Image (cartoon, helix red, strand yellow):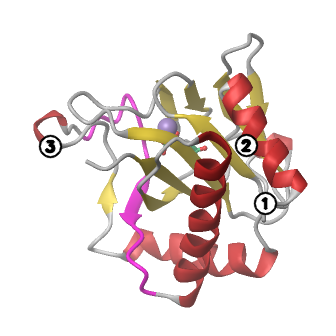
């Protein structure tokens, strides 16, 4: 059974290409994931994020500055989070028959001064990302902290999402361009993608 707010969220996603829900993820879950993100600075298995993958991979400081690691279910918080994403995947498929098959996500820590230039989430040769999900983890984020997610929806005027703890953003991966504005504060987030069967 899909709750009315979740149904409204998914309808908005399909109609405008994006949808935002504040306080979607519980504070305790976000706090646990924020601590994991902050540990990426000292984690030798984390990577300095570039753009593209495979042969296209480049760690281009002109495009992005962040430290990332794929979620691998190593903690109860990660399992809780991917469970919530799985609920969304099933709800989206039930309402819109999109045939979303799986989900993968990465934890990201964007340092002070970090950003991500305007892009969409589908890569050359890997057009199977259909819906992008972003979740924000930092407590007490103020507008002056910067780091907003700027989105260009399908229906016109751009919007800026303040990356406050618990906020969920959904976007259509191929069509909806977005950008992370420079952050004045270390910014912890998760970005994930619902995909078709490869
Ligand atoms: C991404 C992305 C947005 C954000 O990782 O592809 O666009 O607000 N992230 O962190
Ligand atoms: Mn993106």
State the SS at label 3: helix
Q: Main secondary structure of the magenta part?
A: loop
User: Looking at the picture, how far across and down is residue 85, in whole percent?
Assistant: 59, 63
Pointer 2 local density, CA inside 10 Å: few below 14, some 14–19, many at least 20: many
Q: CA distance from mark 2 to mark 3?
A: 32 Å
Is the residue 73 above or below the residue 176 in the image?
A: below
Is the residue 87 above or below the residue 185 in the image?
A: below
Q: Which residue in the structure is indicated by mark 1?
A: 2
State the SS at label 1: loop
Q: Is residue 30 magenta?
A: no
State the SS at label 2: helix
Residue at (74% x, 10% y) in the render? 156
Give the mark, 3 or 1, whose residue is nearer the N terminus.
Answer: 1
Of the 4 image quadrants, the one containing the N terminus is: bottom right
Disc 1: residue Cβ within 8 A of ligand 1's nearest atom: no
User: Looking at the picture, how far across and down is residue 194, in whole percent?
Assistant: 47, 50
Pointer 3 local density, CA inside 10 Å: few below 14, some 14–19, many at least 20: few
User: Could you say which quadrant of the image residue 103 lies in?
Assistant: bottom left
Is the residue 5 above or below the residue 19 in the image?
A: below
Give the mark, 2 or 1, whose residue is nearer the N terminus.
Answer: 1
Span of residues in magenta: 59-74
Please say if the residues under marks 3 and 1 sit with CB atoms less than 8 Å apart: no
Is the residue 152 above or below the residue 73 in the image?
A: above
Residue at (24% x, 27% y) in the render? 124
**Residue positioned most to the right:** 4
User: Looking at the picture, how far across and down is residue 130, in whole percent?
Assistant: 46, 38
Mark on residue 54? 3
Q: Nearer the viewer, residue 194 or 114?
A: 194
Q: CA distance from mark 3 to mark 1?
A: 37 Å
Please say if the residues under marks 2 and 3 sit with CB atoms less than 8 Å apart: no
Mark on residue 10? 2
């Amino acid at each position: 059974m899909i709750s009315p707010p979740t149904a409204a969220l998914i309808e908005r996603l399909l109609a405008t290409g994006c949808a935002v829900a504040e306080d979607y993820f519980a504070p305790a879950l976000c706090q646990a994931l924020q601590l994991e993100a902050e540990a990426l600075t000292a984690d030798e298995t984390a990577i300095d994020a570039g753009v593209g993958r495979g042969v296209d991979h480049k760690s281009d400081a002109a495009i992005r500055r962040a430290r990332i690691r794929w979620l691998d279910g190593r903690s109860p918080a990660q399992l809780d989070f991917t469970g919530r994403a799985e609920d969304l995947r099933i709800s989206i498929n039930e309402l819109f028959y999109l045939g979303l098959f799986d989900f993968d996500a990465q934890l990201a820590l964007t340092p002070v001064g970090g950003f991500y230039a305007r892009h969409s989430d589908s890569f050359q040769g890997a057009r199977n990302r259909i819906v992008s999900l972003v979740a924000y983890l930092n407590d007490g984020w103020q507008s002056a902290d910067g780091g907003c997610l700027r989105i260009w929806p399908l229906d016109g005027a751009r919007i800026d999402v303040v990356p406050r703890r618990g906020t969920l953003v959904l976007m259509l991966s191929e069509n909806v361009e977005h950008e992370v504005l420079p952050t004045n504060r270390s910014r912890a987030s998760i970005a994930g993608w619902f995909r078709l069967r490869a």
